[in-house]
Image (cartoon, helix red, strand yellow):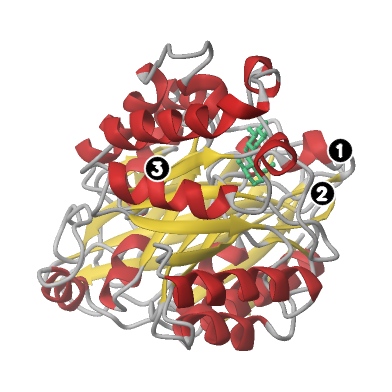
Amino acid sequence: MSAPTGRARRVLAATAAAVVGTLAVGMAVAAPSSAAAEPTLGQLAAAKGRYFGSATDNPTLTNSAYTAVLGSEFGQITVGNTQKWQYTEPRRGQFDYTQGDQIVAFAQAHNQIVRGHTLVWHNQLPDWVTSVPAGELLGVMRNHIANVAGHYKGTVVHWDVVNEAFEENGTRRQSVFQQKLGDSYIAEAFKAARAADPNAKLYYNDYNIEGIGAKSDAVYNMVRSFKQQGIPIDGVGLQAHLVLGQVPSSLRQNIQRFADLGVDVAITELDIRMRTPRDAAKDAQQAADYRTVVNACLAVTRCVGITVWDFSDGYSWIPSVFPGEGAALIYDENFGKKPSYWAVFEALGGTTTTTTTTTTTTGGNGAGCTATYRVVGQWNGGYQGEVTVRNTGATATTGWTVRWTLAQGQTVGSLWNGVVSTNGQEVTVRNANYNGTVAPNGTTTFGFTGSSTGTNPVPTATCTTS
Ligand code: 9MR
């Protein structure tokens, strides 16, 4: 049984050549692999004078499917855990940069800028710091900052100097630093960071300060007072751990008011969580939400960039902290691009070619799938295509097959994440041995390059499960 549902996707037109031209005067990001390849989020953001990045953590750097995306798609990396105090000074006066250095080295190898995270935070703080006598804590904090920011001098563009120092009602969080050093500890931390690395931009970073409210007002007042007193602060990080359908309506206005104080703003830890499992309606809402966030940043000149808090739903902190919630990112567990990815892509100025989706249900076990075919790049004589298979059934697939017809003399050449066979004009792609199992609502994506000498219309692709 086959139910074609042709769907035209609004199309992005920035050519890779134009993006590369802009990058020459912008920040360094990885060059595209071919002149006609689809631009990455990092490249699109760079063309707008921004970065688009992701947090990462050391254990995931051994997963080649993960690092293939991390190293190519993003212009910026945040060290998700291993520059925190717990890792960098686990015992008083003993510093360890092994794991932080590993992530910085990865970023440097892929021409990605690094946000340092974070120098002073009440969490992931070793116990010994909590027991330092009050009279010694300022010296301990200054020494920590001098060493860690000194070690990373020249390799991080931003530091989250102080993280999460306010309560929801705008009062100071009663951390050990607040209790033993009083209100002045934040200014002292910024002064120590400036001394250690005069070229890094110094940020205050927090959550639930994306919209205007008691907490963001408190941060606003602190930044204003720092600017008046000459305390060195360069930026405010809005973490943006958001909830589906609840992007604060004052986001843009809030970014603007911080910018008007003379500091930069960054969206530092973006994710938008939902009750799991995903479905098409939630995905569409999430895409709209991501689009709103990107547009709010682009609307304010001093909003310098956006970082997602890791990029794949398989590597997100959300499910472990919010049971029953997740699917908060822009790639699914199998590194397939979600509607939220394409919303970011389009908001950053990318254009997509027309796609066609055809649904076929077979297999007798209730499984079904759709194939969404996309031409992601075209050049003289060739093209790159991508097909996303989505399981629309109630049970996991054990295998899938996508078929289409090349009506205009095109060929399919190299293909990845699938096994291709051709019979005249008919192309058949079956799953590879590692991606036949797709969970209900899950997706997997394969790609290919081919030749095309004339027109290259988007074919109707059918998907069947087994
Ligand atoms: O992603 C981090 C997770 O792996 C850690 O277990 C957690 C510990 O608190 O910290 C997570 O990152 C946090 C970030 O450093 C600050 N803002 C909130 C982030 C999510 O908890």
Q: Are marks 2 and 1 in contact (CB under 8 Å)?
A: yes
Left or right, 161 with respect to 288, comes to left
Q: Where is residue 101 in the image (x, y as percent from the top left)?
A: 32, 26
Q: In which quarter of the image is the C terminus?
A: top right
Front-lying residue, 106 or 139: 139
Instruction: Tally the marks.
Output: 3
The kind of secondary structure element at disc 3 is helix
Amino acid found under the numbered disc labelled 2 = Gly
Picture residue at 64% right of the left edge, 75% below the top: 221
Q: Which residue is label 3 attached to?
A: 70
Q: Where is residue 197 in the image (x, y as percent from the top left)?
A: 27, 46
Q: Which residue is label 2 attached to?
A: 393
The residues bearing labels 2 and 1 have C-alpha atoms spaced at a distance of: 9 Å
Q: Can residue 345 be seen in this view?
A: no
Tell me the quarter of the picture where residue 408 sits.
Answer: bottom left
Q: Which residue is label 1 attached to?
A: 365
